[in-house]
Image: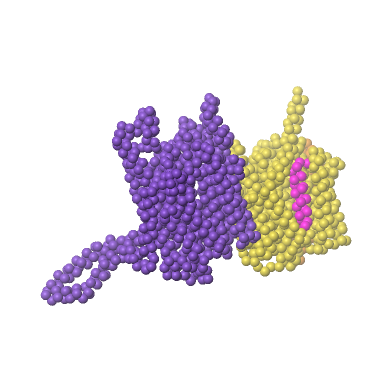
Chain colours: A purple, B yellow, C orange
Amino acid sequence: MDSIDTLLVLIPGLPLAAAITVGLLGARVLKERSHYPVIIALFGSFICSLLLLGEVRKEGESVDDGFEHVVTLWNWADVSNAYELTDTAAADVGSHDFHIDVTLRADALTAIMLSMVTFISSLVAIFAAGYMHGDRGYWRFFAYIGLFVFSMTMLVSVSNFILLFVFWEAVGVCSYLLIGFWYEKPEAAAAGKKAFLVNRVGDFGFALALFLIWTNYGTLNFHDTLPNGSTDPNLIAQVAATPPSEEAAEHAKPAVIRGVLGRLRIATNDYKHGNIALAICLLLLLGACGKSAQFPLHVWLPDAMEGPTPVSALIHAATMVTAGVYMVTRCTPLFMASPEAQLTVACVGGFTALLAGLIALTQYDLKRVLAYSTVSQLGYMFLALGTGTVVGITAGMFHLFTHAFFKALLFLGAGSVMHAMGDVIDMRRFGGLRKLMPTTHATFMIGCLALAGFPLLSGFFSKDSIVAAVEERVHALEHEHERRAAHPVNGAVANDAQDRSAEVEHAGVFALWTPDQLDTFARVYKWLFYSAMFTALLTTFYTFRAFYLTFYGEEVIPHEAGHHAHESPRMMTVPLVVLAVCAAVVGGALDQTWIGPARTHQFGELLLQTPSLANGPAAAAHDAFKFHGKIAGISGAIALGAILLATYLYLGHRREIELIRSLMDFEGFSRWLDVDSVSRWQKARWIAAIHRGATAIGLGWLTALLGNIVLMIAIVLSTPFLLGHFVSPYKLSLRKFFIDELYNFVIVLPLRVFAATCYLVDRWIVDGLVNLLGKLPLLFGNLMRSLQMGLVQFYALAMVLGVVVLLVAKAVLAG
Amino acid sequence: MYVDLDTIKLLWPELVLVLLATWIYIGGTIQQGRWWWGLFALAAYGVSGHAVAVGIVEANTVSGPLTPDSLGYVVRFTAIVLGALFTLVLTASARKELASETIATLMLLICGVMLVGRANDLVFLFVSLELVSIPTYVLLYLGRRDRATSEATVKYFFLSVLSSAVLLYGLTMLYGVAGTTTLVGPGSIQSELQSLSVDAGGLGSLTPVALVLIIAGLGFKMAAVPFHFYAPDVYQGATNANAGLLAVVPKVAGVIALIRVAVIAMPNVAEFAWHVTLVLALVTMTIGNVCALWQQNLRRLMAYSSIAHAGYMLIGVAVAMAMEASGGISGTLFYLLVYAFGSLGMFAALASLGSDEQEVSRLEQLSGLARSRPFVAGAIAVCMFSLAGIPPLAGFWGKFTLFTGAVRVATDSGGQATSVWFAVLAVGGAINAAIAAVYYLRVVAVMYFQPSREANFGTNVGARVVMLFAAVLVVALGIFPRSIFNATEHAESSALREKVAAQTIQRLEAIATSQQVP
Amino acid sequence: MIALVSVSVSHYLVVGAILFVTGVICMATKRNSLGVLMGVELVLNGANLNFIAFGSSYLRANSLGLDGQLMSLFVIVLAAAEAAVALAIALNFYNNHSTIDVDQASDLKG
């Protein structure tokens, strides 16, 4: 256990130490060597994380209900009787004490996240040492990276909602600093600001959720503690087993403070239900949407690509943006208490995945395509979490894990391209780089295949398991619905306690659901399933579109590239290769169910050692991991088909795709129905001839009438198409469904107008008054100054007069 | 009340200064040279300071016209430190042939302040105050011989003599009413006046007249409105070193004398006294601050600043008058110290920039000083910030204690009217602090944000040492104000203890006589 | 003699006050600095008279000792010292202004 303590402290400690070192010494001493401390520290953290993972795995195998170990570092806040509740009926809120310890926890979920974060960040740091070479803020960059990894590792290893929130904000600050790293660029500064502000909306929800949790559960700790702050599991079990004495009961303070995600609470599944649970979960989801860029708060992530590309890879693709997914996974027991919230999570995820996929189809900025792809994949993860089954949650976390590898790979590949192209990222301005950058090309291709879900690459397994989880969910719901229809007596929510327990035994997690709910949910999940399938197609297509535009076709190199236009240095390609290997094999290696039923889903088994997943409500929904041949076949076929389609459309001449584009943009229609072109018809020879003929026989009015009718029809018909010209499917996708514009118009503009009004009022009315007030002393001073006339006799007289005035005042006042 | 050998022993520190000053006057005719006599004077201050420190042990012996309370010790130590610092400034900036006279005269002046600090007798107090005044005339006269200086000297002389006469006239009344010249103790003015009603007619009705005349006479020393008129003209006409002296030393003497006479010894007019003081405080700080807004001459600016600070000090005096043991005396003392070192630092910095040909007097001469003389600019900035009362410098704590004192009286005194008066005082003080910040920060802005101009500044080492010392002290007092607070609080309780003790003895005597009668 | 007997402290105080006021008026109206100095002397002597009157054993039932007389002696000495300084100052003023009229000293103002 002691080694776990040490490792838990070392993992965030090393990057922090490196960040401080670089921050203090970077500008003067380290300069161009600033990356060494950070890379060494990150690599050290990675080793520690692996050791921790090993320890956790070993410990976890020996216990049934999951393994967790909590380290208390120091007490942060201790407010006795923080508030008094009139309703002390709820045992949990009886404690009243606001007691916040700085605690770190080790469990499977944390260990997995730690390993992933430190591994990716080590590789990105190595890559960045090459990529950022020669930048003015070289040391600053690495100090930020160290700080970020510290915050991120703390985020996933703290055992308290308050601290989670603190580091949630800390990674947000790092993200803000790194997006605006090139703060001289106005776009970068604006993007940083946008990310920060949009995240505030989510944080607002998160904070409200914390308040609700505090008032409803009486603590913000994940784990159980004794009132003195001890977290020793044996001691807690002992205290929990002894019945409370009379005195203690009167004292109204429980002997054990049951953490929100503590063993004691999970074991008894003592969670709030109904509207409170829904409110907590939706507010948490709002927070997660902000950080993980889910609709409607997804708008900041594509703009965040203004930051240096390694940052995009590390923070805005692989690690930080998955914090929301991590948080929702961590809070699984809370979400299990509210099926509506789960459905919301799934819908938000599914919708975001589809929306971002559609937008990614038409973007020309390589990094933006990848950014929308990230948003889309995060949507997948949320969709998986929203199924509310252990298989689904595992699938979501598994996708998070594999996605980190191939998305980091793709971004670093994009970074490599940018590096070579002199920071040009518009895909229309370069192309055919296959020969020029062979390593980048090869690794990028592996990344694309993994993202597309090409069979046997890692994305294939994780995405497949998500789709399968959704499908299973649909099946389970439909099955239950049918069962209820067949046995209507047992179907309704039983009032009798005995019936109810029997029902629970029979219906499992669905015990408390009404048939209507079952039916509705089943239908929604079914739609989400189709949507996910379609999104998989989109994903593959836009990925390969970007791939072909960048690496195939005619070789085009922008003039900014200069002499840089060659393969990136070793320092940058090595991380690419490592990541490519991981992206290729990690999925198949950790989920071996595809080899045969005898093999296990190792990732899932490990993840399920997390107490909140191993026990309680989540475990009740546990189903064995298995390989879904049918789904795998379908999605494999989709991936292959989409790849072929993209290959057909983008390789060689791109005539067809232009046609599709113009079709989608209603170009042809509008030309046909354009009023001008209709009026030009009368100049056409044969029409003119007919008209002349008709005029000759005195029927000129008829042809003129006909012509005008045709014109009228054209005008009427063209109106929707004219409108459609602005909102054609192509334009919608290209302009990101006008969501930014919508936000600007609905939120930003009114706020700006309001702010401008306030400014004007402040400037002219308030300031005017204040300035007037400020002038008074000056005027008074000038008046008084004129008394100082320089005559000594006058001064003497003034002194004596002063005395006289005081004496007269006394005489008058005395009466 | 008699004088014996113990009194002489108690006076030893002051006697040292007088004797050595005489020695310098005589020796100066034989041996010329600045540093020779400057170092001699520093040694004299050292001896005197040592004597004061040794004297603390026998502090409980009351003897003759001297009071041994720790208020006196605070004043004497302050005076000695100020004397040593001004000696450094003056030694380096005085003309060579006049250096010894200047230094010796300063020494007498400091001796006068020390005596004021412990005077318990009207005669003694008045003579001590004259020992402050007359050397000041001489110093002003010695500073420079040009048109402006002679005008300043004449103005200061006549107005100061008038103020002395007014003070003396007030003291005669006090003497007449009480029938004694002792301030505090058994059978003193304080105990006589304790039971004397102001409104009953007879001699008692002269007490308010005496009070007004005394406030007028001492108000001149403090530069309180309407006795402030001399200050801007005289400061402007004097040298930087002399202006610093005028801004600091007479003010110390005036405030201490005011505390000794008007606050402690005149209990029967306290009600009237705090009304007068409060109004004077408000008027003084307001006029000082608003007039300073217009000034371009640095010494004139500092003169108005000095007037404004006199107003702040009067807040503490009013608080002390309105409520016994309210921390008013302590706050005033603390403020006095803080002001003294802030002002001293500023004037020393100005003196250090002056050369034989040219003296720094106008604000624009400081423009860009932060680049040409960063240390001097930093010291001036520290002093300005402290005088403006910006935390965490000493000036902040000074204003803080004074304002909280006023607020305390406003909340704790039973009377409705008193509360309103002191609330107005506290608010007025706060508004004034805001106005004052404008011209202090203007000085800083000129130094830091205006382009540097060609100027051949001098390098007056003595003044520079003093400037740095004062700046460091201002910062240190801002960070650790507690040590000085302890001293001033002890001084207050000690000064009031004499009063309380006297009251007790009187009461005991009354009991004894009443018992003897039957 | 009845008139003499009825002379009391307050009579002296009135004379002292008249001296004081006269001195102040003299200071305020005289242009010549020696004239102003004379006004100062008048003021000081008004105060002296007060001291003597208050301290006199002839005018008061209970004698107050010699403090008052002592004080006036001190004041006389101080006045002499001040006169000496005043002469030096006046001389300096004359050197710079070629006059000893103090109303010429109004360069410093504002």
Q: Could you say where residue B267 lies in the image, as x and y percent from the top left? A: 69, 39
Query: Which SS type dominates the magenta stretch?
Result: helix
Q: Could you say where residue B16 lies in the image, as x and y percent from the top left? A: 84, 50
Task: Report the residue that reaches farthest toward the top.
Answer: B518
Residue A293 in view (yes/no): no
Say which quarter of the image contains residue B367.
Answer: bottom right
Q: Is residue A218 left or right of residue B481?
A: left
Residue sitting at 57 percent across and 60 percent down? A129
Q: Nearer the viewer, residue A690 or C86?
A: A690
Q: Is residue A248 left or right of residue B309?
A: left
- Say if A535 sits above or below C70 in the image: below
Q: Nearer the viewer, residue A745 or A678?
A: A678
Q: Which residues are magenta?
A: B68-90
Q: Nearer the viewer, residue B272 or A562?
A: A562
Q: Could you say where residue A172 lies in the image, as x and y percent from the top left? A: 51, 52
Quadrant where the image shows the C terminus of chain A: top right
Residue sitting at 34 percent across and 48 percent down? A527
Q: Is residue A338 left or right of residue B490?
A: left
Residue sitting at 26 percent across and 67 percent down? A672
Residue B82 included in the magenta stretch of the image: yes
Residue B345 in view (yes/no): yes
Say which quarter of the image contains residue A693.
Answer: bottom left
Residue sitting at 36 percent across and 59 percent down? A732
Task: Report the residue that reaches farthest toward the left.
Answer: A697
Q: Could you say where residue A35 lies in the image, as x and y percent from the top left? A: 59, 58
